[in-house]
Image (spheres, rainbow, N blue to C red):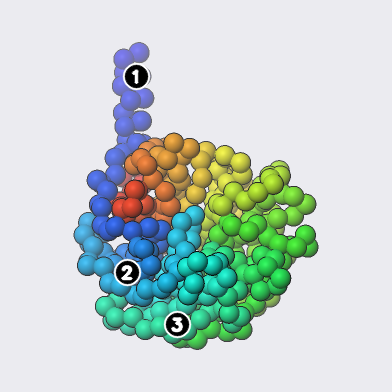
Amino acid sequence: MRIAFFLVVLSLTLSLRAEPTPVDFADGAEPQATVANGNTLYVVYGKDKQILFTLSRDGGKTFEKPVKIAQAPMLPLGMRRGPRIAVVKNAIVVTAITGENPKKRADGDITAWRSTDDGHTWADVGHVNDMLASAREGLHDLASDGNQRLYCVWLDLRNDNKTALYGSLSRDGGISWEENTKIYQSPDGHICECCHPSVAFDSDGSVHVLFRNWLDGNRDMYLTRSSDAKKFSEPKRLGVTSWKLNGCPMDGGDLTIDSHNKPVVVWRQKNDLFMTTASGGDQQIGTGRQPVVAVNKSGAYTAWVAANADLMVESPQGQPHKIAHDTTDPVVVTDPDVKFAYCLWESKGKLYATTLKPSSE
């Protein structure tokens, strides 16, 4: 009996392997990150009305002095609003939705900035949305194919204030953006008004977009795909049941691509959190909100915020466990060819980062 008990304890100890002590690297809100160029961690975030950038070259142990990219009279932050970041060949690209009138929510445009010197200096390269003020809801996402193509997706209000899903492609590393594409508008008039969309490229160059719909009174998650970044497939609903809700949960889930070039999605329905994969269907991963996911050769890394604001994470071959408390807005990022991931989050106006590794190591 004692031997069996010891083996159970040992197994739990190994599966709940402690992560490194989180690094408090900045004051700010809404951290977003990406990994590229030899596992350099590139981070963008907001603070007051400023968009700030930093990076770590040593696995998230230390971060360089923040650089101010831009400042705007109005910078929406909170509930997944805030800047986004992607790396293309020979450049870092940041997008953010900003406005000129902080007293009114009547304007809001997606501006892009580029840096070709590893984030030391930044150039404003203009708007992504081709109708002014149409992106004023403040929710968007940005993805890179790792070369020169970028795709930006956002909630758009150009059609009589009825929220639709729009996107735009850049073929030259963010220098210019093509005519905006209406990806989807619900036949009931609008999609979910305050849930952020997510976007990712697969290795074939197709664009995958995740969003929360509003259809027949249901607030369900949908996934769509385009091989040419222009014409998108009929969106496919996730889950086997619907979430009828007279309001917006303000929680859009997250999307990435696995080693088989298939989308992996995490999303929320009521208080339950699910992961959907091409091979395994829907799997409940926990309860809470703001689920995020990243996938590398070790498997899937997930994080979410529990009802009591604890930050929960799960690494490959591991079990869900708490790594921080009083948290919001987590993000998990990795490189497909490594065996670890980075987790970043906000807590009481400070930003933290730590490294997640497979529990078997």
Say which of marks 2 and 1 sits in front: 2
Q: How packed is label 1: few (under 14 Cα within 10 Å), some, or many (20 or more)?
A: few
The span from disc 2 to disc 1 (Cα, nearest Å) is 49 Å
Q: Using residue 184 as the reference point, say whether residue 131 is left or right of it.
A: left
Residue, disc 3 = 173
- Which comes before the other along the chain, label 3 or label 2? 2
Would residue 208 be visible to someone looking at this image? no
Q: Do callouts 1 and 3 mark residues in contact (Cβ within 8 Å)?
A: no
Say which of marks 1 and 3 sits in front: 3
Residue, disc 2 = 53
- What x and y, as percent, mark residue 101? 49, 72
The quadrant of the image that shows the N terminus is top left
Residue, disc 1 = 5
Image mark for residue 13: none
Q: Amino acid under label 3?
A: Gly
- What x and y, as percent, mark residue 135? 57, 71
Q: How packed is label 2: few (under 14 Cα within 10 Å), some, or many (20 or more)?
A: many
- What x and y, as percent, mark residue 283? 57, 42
The span from disc 1 to disc 3 (Cα, nearest Å) is 56 Å
